[in-house]
Image: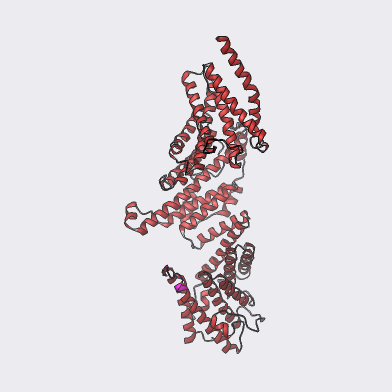
Amino acid sequence: MADNQSAEWTAVCEKFRLAHELSEIESKKDPENNPFRSKYKARDLFKEIHCSLKKNQIEEEGEVDNGADSESSQTGDGEPGNDFGKAYAGDSPAGLRVARLAVVQYHLGVNHIETEELSAGEEHLMTCMKLIDKCTTTRENVSLFIQARNQLGILWAGRDEIEKAQGFLEIAETMYLLYMKEDGQPPLDLQDFFVPQGEELSQQEKTRRFEMAYTHTLYYLAQVYKNLQQYERAGQYCHSTLQRQLEYKQFVPLEWAINAATLSQYYITKTRYMEARHCLAAASVIATLAGEIPSEAAAKESEAEFEKREELLQKRAEIARCWIKYCLNLLQDAKKLLEDNVGELDSDRQEELKRARRNEEEEKEKGRKSAILFGSSDTFDSICSLEEKVSSMLPLDFEEARGIFLVGQGYVAQAKEYFEMDGHVTDHIEILQDHSALFKVLAFFEEDLERRCKMHKRRVDMLEPVCKDLNAQYYLLICRQLQFELAETYYEMMDLKLAVADKQDQPDVHTIKKFNLLCSSSTKYYQMFLDSVRSPEGKFPEKLEDDLLRPALVAKFRVARLQSKLISSNPASQLENLSLSLESYKFVVQYCEENPEAKDVVETELELSVEMVSLLPLKINRIKSTMASSN
């Protein structure tokens, strides 16, 4: 096929163009009852091209050269011939002939994989590899080298042969890096092998396609490293993939945004909040490129508009949920850093951290930041301005914490717009729980006890109605979570009221009434939680399941404490409350004696329970004596 302008060559090029069109465009219109119709037509054309190439190769070289024998030429199998041991310069005429055969084998391989014939696909791809492995890597074939290995990497990953996939993909990565170092010019694209002279792709388009092939290598490597639990490397490769997709403008906005938001959650687990914030800001900005959300009226009139509205609302709500997690984790990590051994804010530690922050080198942060930036000139400013709305540094006082809390609360409202209670029960409640957790951690930074109490009251107000309305038969786990959280919230409010009362000489009637109400409410929800563990006959299990062991024993311990804290001027009521309290403390002690593995799980609670089991009888006896003498 020396004369590329010949009618025969033009016909081959036209077949290749048509096969590509069938595969990439027409196949999307295939009917459901014949989903691979266009793919099969494309396959037939690729086989015809293979036959033409073999026929021409025989005519030009006078022998079968690294292709298929006559039988496999008919089938398109492309088995190597007798002189397969020859090596070719990648840019020689013979090397180009081999590369063309390899390109057809590559397309046949991809075609079989797309029609779910994986073994046949693997055979064609391996034949492609054998053909080009005898050619030196040059501008003419480097893209094919990389793409063939990409496809084999995907194939083996799909079979859960992750290390085999890793091998193919890492060689593809090395090839790219070596080529860019030694040559770096735009290489031939696979399409360039089958176009009439003068119709080759532009240098710019060749570069774009080659860079995207390498972006795919990085993307697949990110998945491979994730499967191998090499999360640090997976995160790096995912970040590079996202950067390159933006740089070469090869991305679907919503898909890119969700991937960036997902990556942010990995950075959060590593407490790398600057990177997490950057991913989320970029996700929010890029998501807007998917277009305006159609109105409800438009969605009612057109199914396409309805689907578009649903998808846009859902994905933006999912990104909002990732923002909530960012704000919540940032606050919670700051709390861990600042709390003392009883869970209160350590002011000395706070001052020490503030001083350290003032002395931090800004250059170090700038250096880190320059390495992670997303965005092109048209999105960069939007991403940066969104980042500026929330800090990536751990908050060290109430004002800083409140700023992060407010951003998180804004995203709670956004997420709830899509994830409504009607139709999204689990998601809606999870968002409410995150909102409650935001209030809880903000309260830690608040020094005024009354204001702190009001924050916990907000938590009660948002969770209590849901807990009452939820059907425990269908949502047992969620009901238990809500019951336990409400019990804990009332418990914290009780402790705060107790701290306020301790500052007064003599608590007034209103304060006592409020305090007792908080005790009773906390006890009620702990009891509801404990009752949910009972059998249908009302029997408490002799042995608690692992996931219920600590919560159930903590609930029993706190019920005991709450019962002993109730304030009453009536000795009979005092006696009843203390007797119930003693019973609950005894339960914790007895359970741990019968199940020694529980001792480590509730070490502190057990220690205090043992102490109270010995002290409370003395207190009870004193009240009994007082009651007897007064009679």
The image quadrant that residue 159 belongs to is bottom right
Q: Pick the quarter of the image with the N terminus.
A: bottom right
Q: Is residue 582 above or below residue 210?
A: above
Q: Is residue 552 above or below residue 107?
A: above
Q: Which color scheme did the rendering employ for the protein?
A: secondary structure
The answer to which of 472 and 463 lies nearer the viewer is 472
Q: Percent position (x, y) of residue 489?
A: 51, 33
Q: Residue at x 40, y 54 (%)?
A: 310
Q: Percent position (x, y) of residue 357?
A: 60, 40
Q: Is residue 488 above or below residue 312?
A: above
Q: Percent position (x, y) of residue 192?
A: 52, 76
Q: Which residues are magenta?
A: 32-39
In the rendered image, residue 548 lying in the magenta stretch gets the answer no
Q: Residue at x 58, y 47 (%)?
A: 269
Q: Main secondary structure of the magenta part?
A: loop
Q: Is residue 289 above or below residue 605?
A: below
Q: Percent position (x, y) of residue 130?
A: 63, 76
